[in-house]
Amino acid sequence: MTLQKWIEDRAIHGFPTFSIDDVRAAGIYSSEQILYNELSRLCANNTIANVYQGFYVIVPTQYILRGSIPATYYIDQLMTGLGKPYYVCMLSAAELLGAAHQRPQQFSIMTTFPKRRIVSARNVTIDWFYRDKLPEDSLITKNTETGTIQISNALLTAADLVQYQQHVGGLSRVATILEELSEQIDIRRQFAPLVPYVKKVVWQRLGYLLENIIEEKALADDLYEQLRSTTGYLNYLPLSTSAADNPSNRDSRWKININVQIETDDI
């Protein structure tokens, strides 16, 4: 059996990905060099795509002309192969929740340490973020073409966007997304599972945005009530992580030093 025939059989039987170890286990090639040569040839003619070290996706016909395979097509299989827990986060999660205004250029994945190398598959790049442990109770399952994926729920998505504001284009962009994402946030139900995972300052910044920028007063009040009952005293901290602190301009409720101007015209 040729490698191409073996790949076609996998695709027919519903297996859209494979690793180089899977090929070795099939006993198709007598030498590593011949195996690598054939894998390179099939990558060059768009039969397969190498999306990680020794991990391949069988390119479906609908993506050949597009020039890229969406990460949702293979991310669950990749992370299972790596033996790593994960969830789709930030702008990528917001898009899947229907709250992104445009498709992000990078696909964001939260996983656990140790760190991984950046993965590129044609023009799709996976941006890795890390926690010591994932908040499993704050993840939801979404269907994809090839199965399911794990993504952050609305509140965890909002918290990650605020925490990693520099990675997503700043707080004006975060506020833009929050305006739509807020419709799916349920503070009373979603807050408690995240207390061990999200820093207090992230909630302070999120609360300020909800109340003062997108004017979701009810959500802000719910968050303030939960925050004060679980974390106690708040310290003054800067709103933006990318600008110098400005203690002369303060929000006394959220204990936020307003060190950046968020233009409401951007929302």
Image (cartoon, helix red, strand yellow):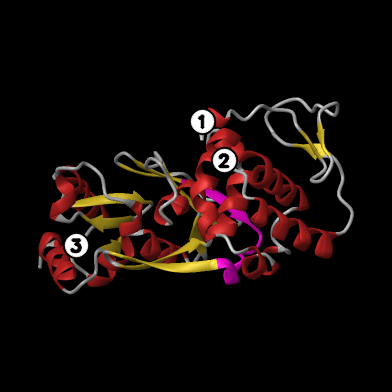
Check disc 3 and give the amino acid type. Tyr
Whole-percent x, y for residue 88 in the image: 47, 56
Reading the image, the residue beneath label 3 is 29
Q: Taking the image as drawn, is residue 176 in sight?
A: yes
Image quadrant where one finds the N terminus: bottom left
Few, some or many C-alpha atoms within 10 Å of disc 1 (few <14, some 14-19, many ≥20)?
A: few
Q: How many marks?
A: 3
Whole-percent x, y for residue 58 in the image: 21, 58
Q: Is any atom of residue 170 visible in this view?
A: no
The numbered disc on residue 175 is 2
Start-end of magenta stretch: 127-138
Q: Quick one: label 2 or label 1, which is nearer the N terminus?
A: 2
Report how far apart the C-alphas of labels 1 and 3 lie in the structure.
57 Å
Residue drawn at point x = 66 percent, y = 60 percent: 132
Could you give the CA–CA distance between mark 2 and mark 1, rounded to whole angstroms?
9 Å
Q: Residue at x 81, y 64 (%)?
A: 230
Q: Is residue 147 above or below residue 41?
A: below
Q: Which residue is mark 1?
A: 266
Residue 237 x %, y %: 81, 39
Q: Amino acid at mark 1?
A: Asp
